[in-house]
């Protein structure tokens, strides 16, 4: 019988991790549900269902992550939400 020797090469793979950021929308006593829903659909490209769920979470929990991504991508969206009078931040 012959022995078959298997050679396994180890490869080091460099993986660049990019930290994901979130836009956090905070509750306020100024804007209506419909306005917040419409804003999330327009700015964050939510479906109507997503926007409604986020709006309900913001109302009852005080805040909700409404968009996740790279900081550069989120910066303009957060600015647009702020310009609309919503309370938002990137974390």
Image: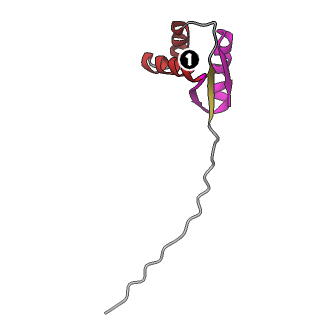
Res. 35 image quadrant:
top right
Task: Name the residue: 53% across, 22% down.
Answer: 57
Res. 88 image quadrant:
top right
Residue 45 visible from this viewpoint: no
Q: Is residue 13 left or right of residue 89?
A: left
Q: Is residue 21 left or right of residue 34?
A: right
In which quadrant will I find the C terminus?
A: top right
Residue 72 visible from this viewpoint: yes
> In terms of depth relative to the viewer, which is nearer, 22 or 77?
22
Res. 59 image quadrant:
top right
Q: Is residue 30 magenta?
A: no
Secondary structure at badge 1 equals: helix
Task: Name the residue: 66% across, 9% down.
Answer: 85
Q: Identify the residue position indicated by label 1 in the image.
A: 59
Give percent across and percent down for residue 72: 67, 29
Give percent across and percent down for residue 87: 67, 16
- Which segment did they paint magenta? 62-91
Residue at far bottom of view: 1
Q: Is residue 52 left or right of residue 88?
A: left
Task: Name the residue: 52% across, 17% down.
Answer: 55
Give percent across and percent down for residue 31: 60, 7
In which quadrant will I find the N terminus?
A: bottom left
The type of colouring in the image is secondary structure
Q: Is residue 9 above or below residue 18?
A: below
């Amino acid at each position: 019988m012959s022995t078959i020797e298997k050679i396994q090469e180890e490869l080091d793979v460099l993986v660049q991790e990019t930290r994901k950021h979130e836009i956090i929308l905070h509750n306020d006593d100024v804007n209506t549900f419909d306005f917040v829903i419409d804003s999330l659909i327009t700015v964050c490209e939510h479906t109507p269902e997503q926007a409604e769920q986020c709006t309900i979470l913001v109302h009852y929990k005080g805040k909700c992550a409404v968009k996740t991504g790279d900081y550069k991508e989120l910066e303009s969206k957060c600015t647009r939400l702020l310009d609309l009078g919503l309370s938002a931040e990137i974390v």
